[in-house]
Image (tube, helix red, strand yellow):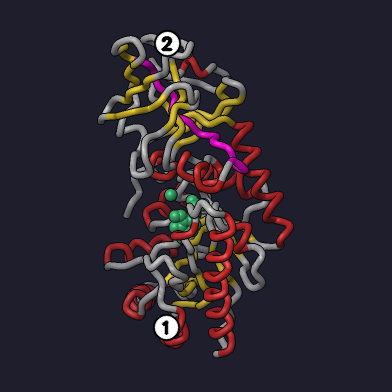
Amino acid sequence: MYSPKVGDGLDSLDTPSMIVDLDLMEANIKKLMDALLPTGRDIRPHLKTTKSAILARKLNAAGAKGGCVAKLSEAEAITAAGFTDLLITCEIIGPHKVRRLVELFRKHRGIRIVVDSEVGASAINDALAASDIEDPISVLIDVDVGLHRTGVAPEQAVPLARHVGTLEHLRLIGVQGYEGHLQHLHDREDRKQQCLASMKTLTETASALRAEGYSIDVVTTGGTGTAEFCASVPGVTELQPGSFIFMDTDYRNAVGTFYSNSLTVLSTVVSRQGERQVTIDAGLKSLTTDSGLAECKDRRYTHTNLGDEHGCLTWEDDGTPALRVGDRVEMVPSHIDPTINLHEVYYAHRKGVIEEIWPVDSRGKVQ
Ligand code: PLP
Ligand code: MN
């Protein structure tokens, strides 16, 4: 039976398989912690990238405090896998989710949520009021700091806080403002200046709420491309970077190689198609393409095309060794979070020896 084990070499893995270079991953974590912990900010890494309770625990052991998840169903999966200090960063809307939230909160009172509408806040309050749970749930007001995805306009934060203030089962603890539109800006100075402007909006909103008497203890924000700038702004208390742990080619091309690509998809050459072209067994079902094609780690080979199950690698006639049927290559994902969502398990290796095997706990948890 096929059952790769700790202690086996990578050659024991069938393909495609998602593999993590532990030395590189640990270096990424250390770089982030060394850069951000001295700023005094809490680090609440976004687990929408790793989807793994084991990795959440590793990040916390390295200095993080808690984690973020995007969706309610991710929170269900990560808490079931044993990691419970979570902020759910997407609004929870609709009767099914609100019911599920009450059940999650019944088990884990530390869960934090965000709201950006009166109707959304009231629905959660009503469901808690109808339950036998007496503790209020901790809530952050989501503020739009320029992404225009979710969040109230800054001037709507105080009116929403007033409404939340009337809801007995919600306890306002802070604000969230995510500047996702800035993460991949190539020009570092431009990214910094736009980020500082977004942070001004966010911290001024927090101040306006405090002026109305609300205790705003948490001001949470930031991603891999901006966390260092967010951390320089007085009033920001918490940072939410996610991708730094593994990176991807899209992030590398935008923000550089401070963090390295520590995750690849191991793939096998399954067919030779002429002199300088082969087909590999990793296609759309193993590597996402929303941010372009994955790259071969050995950059002498160019990834030119892919279908559901296959990819195509070509190379120049410049002495680059020909790939042969049965050879293995490592592909570097172009966008890490949705690529991980395609896989069930990580094989974490050090110098080619499998050291740990981690489930992707919240794989497919999109609700
Ligand atoms: N915070 C929120 C609300 C996000 O949506 C994301 C990613 O989309 C992040 C943090 C993490 O950002 P990154 O993966 O760019 O580090
Ligand atoms: Mn992403």
Res 271 → quadrant: top left
- Residue drawn at the location 32% of the way across and 78% of the way down: 119
Position above or below: 250 against 22: below
Q: Please, what secondary structure does the residue beneath circle 1 have?
A: helix
Give the residue type that dot 2 points to: Ala
Q: Mark 1 points at which residue?
A: 156
Residue 69 is at least partly visible in this image: no
- Residue drawn at the location 49% of the way across and 72% of the way down: 140
Relative image position of residue 48 (x, y in whole percent):
45, 50
Of 73 and 244, the residue lying toward us? 244
- Circle 1: is it few (<14), some (14-19), or many (20+) Cα within 10 Å? some
Give the residue type that dot 1 points to: Gln
Q: How many marks?
A: 2
First in residue order: circle 2 vs circle 1: 1
Position above or below: 77 against 40: above
Q: Mark 2 points at which residue?
A: 322
Does residue 355 appear left or right of residue 88 in this picture?
right
Position above or below: 38 against 279: below
Residue furthest to the bottom: 212
Q: What stretch is highlighted in magenta?
A: 257-269
